[in-house]
Amino acid sequence: MKLKKIWISILIIAVAGLSFYSFNRDQKNFEIAKNLEIYYSLFRELNMFYVDDINPNKLVKTSIDGMLESLDPYTNFISEDQMEDFRFMTTGEYAGIGALIGKQNDKIVISEPYEGFPAQKFGLKAGDIILEVEGKSTEKMNTEDVSSLLKGPAKKPVKIKLQRPGEKKPFEVDVIREKISIDAVPYYGMVDPKTAYIRLSNFTVNCSEDVKKAFLELRKEKPEALILDMRSNPGGLLQESVKIVNLFVPKNSEVVSTKGKVKQWDKTYTASAAPIDTTIRIAVLTNRASASASEIVAGAIQDLDRGLVIGERTFGKGLVQTTRDLSYNTKLKVTTAKYYIPSG
């Protein structure tokens, strides 16, 4: 009889718990629906009665950015006109004119037209002042604004109005954009007869292959130590960081694990392939601008006793972002998990 009462009590608690969970879920769904309806009606009223014409795209983008900004700095809405920049961040490729631009005396100038790329082919020179891009004055723009205007579909022209120092009249050039790749490994070499050096600037698609090729080339010189320079590397693709660690640690070593709200997405990443060198001494260089995937590589190399981390304390991001496709060719980059190196 006593046992029966205990089971009845447990059943009542379980049912109450389920009811509470169901109530909370229904309440949350109601709050979402209510607030979306408020937002829609507010926007409709603004559009109908605000004294001036409103730009719906700009207004909605501002409200979305404000909402996401309240969460964390890494959860972002990627609009259709930002997709080119997003692809560049993940692939290291973009379509543009192939020139470094900067600001001098409050004017946007061509700092360096890269050899073999459109800017050089169409006669742009270092020091040329960019006055307009596609008819838009650059007078109140920063370098990021101008850079964004210069990018666009490959094989399509971009009209640039320039002023060359020493010449009286400005001139216009239609520069045909090309696909341009930025090397994830911009430099590698021997710093002395016993020490190899690899500079890794970002974690884009296949950057692990670039590191592997660079190291195999340097290994011909029989180095005893490797410097992996990741200073000011902002990070990128988590999978690429795992592959880079995999080059230097025993197979099946745990590299990093991720944990988030969606438990099915929790994952432990291990070194799944055979390494290329598990004995060379490694020094990883970092600074305060080394973040995300850079921190995973540095932390795993040190935790797995494959090397030392030298330099400043890193950025300390500790978060993983996932991109989700939205309507009208837009995306949401959302923080979905925290990552943990082998030591936690």
Image (cartoon, rainbow, N blue to C red):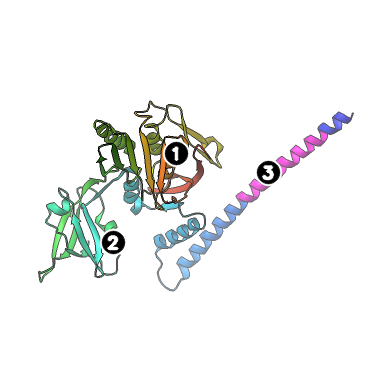
Who's the residue at 49% across and 54% down the image? 72
User: Closer to us: mark 2 or mark 3?
Assistant: 2
Residue under circle 2?
143
Report the disc number at residue 21: 3
Q: Quadrant location of the N terminus?
A: top right
Few, some or many residues within 10 Å of mark 2 (<14, 14–19, 20+): some
* Circles 1, 2 touching at the beta carbon (< 8 Å): no
Q: Nearer the viewer, residue 250 or 194?
A: 194
Q: Nearer the viewer, residue 182 or 214?
A: 214
Q: Is residue 37 above or below residue 263?
A: below
* Residue occupying the far front of the picture: 193
Few, some or many residues within 10 Å of mark 3 (<14, 14–19, 20+): few
Residue 159 part of the magenta segment: no
Specify the segment rendered in magenta: 8-29
Q: Quadrant of residue 16?
A: top right
| Distance between mark 1 and mark 2 Cα atoms | 38 Å
Q: Quadrant of residue 278?
A: top left
In the rendered image, is residue 238 in sight? Answer: no
Nearer-N-terminus badge (2/3)? 3
Horizontally, residue 219 falls left or right of residue 327, namely left
- Could you tell me which secondary element the residue under label 1 belongs to? helix
Q: Is residue 126 above or below residue 14?
A: below
Residue under circle 1?
302
Nearer-N-terminus badge (3/1)? 3
